[in-house]
């Protein structure tokens, strides 16, 4: 759980999970671009988080920025090389960044609060998009099942 561990470390280091504060302190820039119809939610290159001109919601934007922050913290120095690598490596890095975003935006300290919440309720409670809520809901369900609670 590389993403989860890194999220916990960063929250401890900064004393909070304030996304904008961490991005600013890390010295990252946020640039909005016309992605020309490409289906990117975000991309991260050399200290810059690129977001589309229009996002569907604040939740999508926060989730995408946290995902890009995960790439910055977990995959330093290899973003340029991803284009030439096989899909398995790219998928692994995407999964790690998504896991980071989920545990950063909904930290371990919130685990008990997830109990019984549906994915849409998690979205509303934490202002995240469905992909982040599903990562955390899935983790809560796995944990509860292992403990025999579900």
Image (spheres, helix red, strand yellow):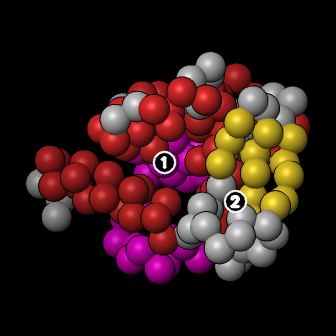
User: On the image, numbered disc 1 is attached to which residue?
Assistant: 98
Give the residue at x 59% y 37%: 70
Q: Secondary structure at mark 1?
A: helix
Depicted 113 relative to depicted 83: above or below: below
Q: Residue at x 41, y 56 (%)?
A: 136
Residue 74 position within the rendered picture, expressed as x and y whole percent measured from the top left: 55, 27
Task: Please tell me how crowded label 1 is: few (under 14), some (14-19), or many (20+) other residues with Cα within 10 Å.
Answer: many
Query: Residue shown at 60%/61% (left/top)?
Result: 40
Nearer to us in this view, 129 or 76: 76
Asked which quadrant contains residue 79, the reply is top right
Q: Position of residue 58 (x, y in %)?
A: 73, 71
**Residue at mark 2:** 62
Q: Determine whether 47 is above or below 66 in the image.
A: above
Given residues 112 and 139, the one toward you in this image is: 139
User: Overall secondary structure of the magenta stretch?
Assistant: helix
10 Å neighbourhood of mark 2: few (<14), some, or many (≥20)?
Answer: some
Residue 99 lies in magenta, yes or no? yes
Give how far across and how far down residue 105 sits, in percent. 60, 51
Q: Quadrant of residue 137?
A: bottom left
Sequence-wise, the earlier of marks 1 and 2 is 2
104 displayed left or right of 14: left
* Residue 9 shows in the view: no
- Find residue 57 and report its horizontal and vertical position in percent: 70, 77
Number of numbered markers: 2
The residue positioned farthest toward the top in the image shown? 77
Magenta stretch contains residue 25: no
The residue lying at 34 percent from left, 35 percent from top is 86
Describe the element under mark 2 as helix, strand or loop: helix
Magenta region: 95-124
């Amino acid at each position: 759980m590389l993403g989860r561990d890194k999220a916990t470390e960063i929250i401890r280091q900064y004393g909070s999970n304030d996304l904008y504060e961490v991005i600013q302190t890390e010295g990252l820039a946020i640039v909005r671009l016309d992605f020309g119809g490409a289906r990117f939610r975000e991309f991260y290159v050399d200290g810059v988080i690129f977001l589309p001109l229009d996002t569907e919601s604040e939740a999508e934007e926060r989730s995408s920025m946290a995902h890009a922050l995960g790439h910055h913290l977990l995959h330093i120095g290899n973003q340029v090389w991803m284009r030439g690598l096989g899909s398995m490596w790219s998928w692994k890095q995407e999964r790690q960044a998504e896991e980071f975003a989920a545990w950063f935006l909904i930290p371990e300290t919130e685990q008990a609060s997830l109990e019984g919440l549906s994915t849409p309720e998690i979205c509303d409670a934490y202002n995240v998009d469905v992909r982040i809520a599903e990562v955390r809901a899935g983790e809560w369900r796995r944990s509860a099942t292992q403990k025999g609670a579900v």
